[in-house]
Image (cartoon, rainbow, N blue to C red):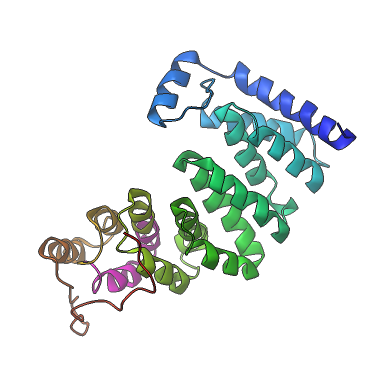
Amino acid sequence: MTNSAEAASIEGASIEAAIRTAGDPRRAVSERAYLKSDREFCGASAPAVRQVVRAWCAARPALERESLLAVTTWLWDRPLFECRRAAVELLRARPRLLQPADTGLIEAMLRDSGTWALVDDLAGHVMGGLTEAYPELASVLDRWSRDPDFWLRRSAMLALLGPLRRGDGDFDRFSGYADAMLAEREFFIRKAIGWVLRDTAKRRPGLVAGWLAPRVHLASGVTVREAVKPLPPGVRDLLLAGYREKRPVTLPGTAPAPRSAPAPAHTRK
């Protein structure tokens, strides 16, 4: 074992020990069942894991990128689910240490996650923050949006969520992803489209309503019900009626909607 690997093992083991101390056997049983996972659980809550990681980072203000990645990888490879959660929290805690080259590790973790409980923070916070810092990584999201793995496709959309939630961001890129996935049957894709639309609509309701109106008859109920939550009641009612009646919607003050939205670049059943 190399010195760096041995150091990562020692540091990772200290994090794991603290997590196990914060565990609750009853919670472990319920969370394992809830997430339908076959991994080991100790029952430490997400806030408890986050606190352990933050305390560990605070005690190491000079933490370097190589050590961050080594400990992250060590934790991810452990059988304990909460260690995987800690690995994600570790990357979230030190975003300025990450570089574009680290997208390979992030992608590998996403492919290996198998649950929204890891994917969403890894995509939304870690990859999202990295893409904001390095806009050229949008090309990676473009590739993810076409990947056969639906967790990667979901991640491509969630990585755009932070700026959109703030009233900024690349809505055109999200729109392209969403159009290509609108016909998908996968629940986690449908939910992600609705989630991004909902959070965008909190600051830009007109943008979201205008995007959804000509497509509402093509979208799933999961997507539509989520997307319309922040919209004004009158607009929400019009869109929901269009969804129920399977027709595009013309919003007040806009031109009549086409009978169908532009054909997506690709769809998956």
Percent across and percent down for residue 167 are 46, 65
Percent across and percent down for residue 115 are 46, 40
The quarter of the picture where the N terminus appears is top right
- The single residue placed furthest to the bottom in the displayed view is 255
The quarter of the picture where the C terminus appears is bottom left
Q: Residue at x 62, y 16 (%)?
A: 21
Percent across and percent down for residue 234 are 16, 65
Percent across and percent down for residue 140 are 59, 64
Q: Quadrant of residue 242?
A: bottom left
- The single residue placed furthest to the right in the displayed view is 3
> Is 217 situated above or below 92?
below
Q: Nearer the viewer, residue 96 or 38?
A: 38
Q: Residue at x 27, y 61 (%)?
A: 231
- The single residue placed furthest to the left in the displayed view is 245
The magenta stretch spans residue 102: no
Residue 64 can be seen, yes or no: no
Magenta span of residues: 195-216
Q: Is residue 173 left or right of residue 215?
A: right
Q: Nearer the viewer, residue 199 or 103?
A: 103
Q: Residue at x 81, y 45 (%)?
A: 66
Q: Quadrant of residue 12?
A: top right
Q: Quadrant of residue 79?
A: top right
Q: Nearer the viewer, residue 13 or 153?
A: 153
